[in-house]
Amino acid sequence: MKLVFNNISKKYKTKIALDDFNITLTDGIQALLGPNGAGKSTLMNILAGLTKPSSGNITLDNEDTVKMGAKFRGILGYLPQNPGFYPSFTGYDLMKYFSVLKGIAGPESRIDELLEFVNLSSDSNRKYGEYSGGMKRRLGIAVSLLNDPKVLILDEPTAGLDPKERMRFRNILSRIGRNKIIIIATHIVSDVETIADNVILLKSGKLILSGSTSQVEEHIVGKVWNKPSDINEAEEYVLLNSNANIIKHGEEVSLHIVSDVKPFENAVAAQPTLEDVYMYFFDEGGMAGEKK
Ligand code: ADP
């Protein structure tokens, strides 16, 4: 499948949330990365048909998604940040309720299969309101998968989850299958670093860069540095510079710095990670180069 965003712009009164955004997405996990306010939710709301763009359109295999109407909604799964499910419903009842809304015939086996998939079978008769954050997110995924969507949107899916639940969630996402376009909008790099087939960097409503993880990392080769340090120097440095973090290996301390220029005489070039790419393009301190 081919999902094409054509010249999407969105203006809210005076604020330009999206500025001539163009991209073509294919099957696989698409990580939409950007800091708060970048325009991720606006873009996902436009894709879901909940917000109208000021200009531009989106096509799925050459068909305008707005004109597709119900046909597009039938193949779309959307897990918003706060789905607002009824807290007094059990997990199972919510699945049943949404199956009816989505017109799924004889849904019982599908519900059982999905509850199993997200590891909630044994909690399916508990009330949603009593679920932990992680369980809520997992139920959300199960609901969004009910109609076996071909395009699945997940907006900040791990917000508020602890590391273990995050990992669990990542594992579920990586098992969903590759015959879908799965778009994960997030500002948390570690959520998508190991599972994304394609990374899209969005800043102030503009597309900055996209490609596989290794392709986007390629962009900052020669701009990432490690420098042997001691804890006092390292702590002072990161306090003053937002483009750096401290790495500890037992007793050894080093500074990991993203910078266009070699920051110290004894700094050595390091292999960039997606975290570094994020730091390079989205560093609010502006230490890592001018052309952001
Ligand atoms: P993100 O999801 O990346 O945090 P958003 O799409 O929510 O970004 O927001 C992008 C920009 O548009 C922000 O500056 C935000 O304040 C603004 N914005 C979003 N929704 C509205 C709205 N309904 N009215 C006015 N401004 C909005």
Image (cartoon, grey):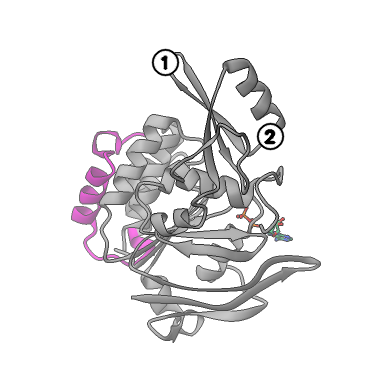
| Position of residue 143 in the picture relative to residue 216 (left or right) | left
Ligand 1: quadrant of the figure: bottom right
The outermost residue toward the left is 109
Q: Quadrant of residue 198?
A: bottom left
Q: Is mark 1 within 8 Å of ligand 1?
A: no
Magenta region? 99-126
Kind of element beneath mark 1? loop
Quick one: label 1 or label 2, which is nearer the N terminus?
2
Kind of element beneath mark 2? loop
Label 1, on which residue?
250
- The image shows residue 222 at horizontal and vertical percentages of 51, 49
Depth check: 211 or 236 in front? 236
Label 2, on which residue?
241
Depth check: 21 or 61 in front? 21
Residue type, mark 2 in image: Asn
Q: Are marks 1 and 2 in contact (CB under 8 Å)?
A: no
* Residue 24 falls within the magenta-colored stretch: no
- The image shows residue 137 at horizontal and vertical percentages of 42, 43
Whether residue 191 is visible here, answered yes or no, is yes
Residue type, mark 1 in image: Gly
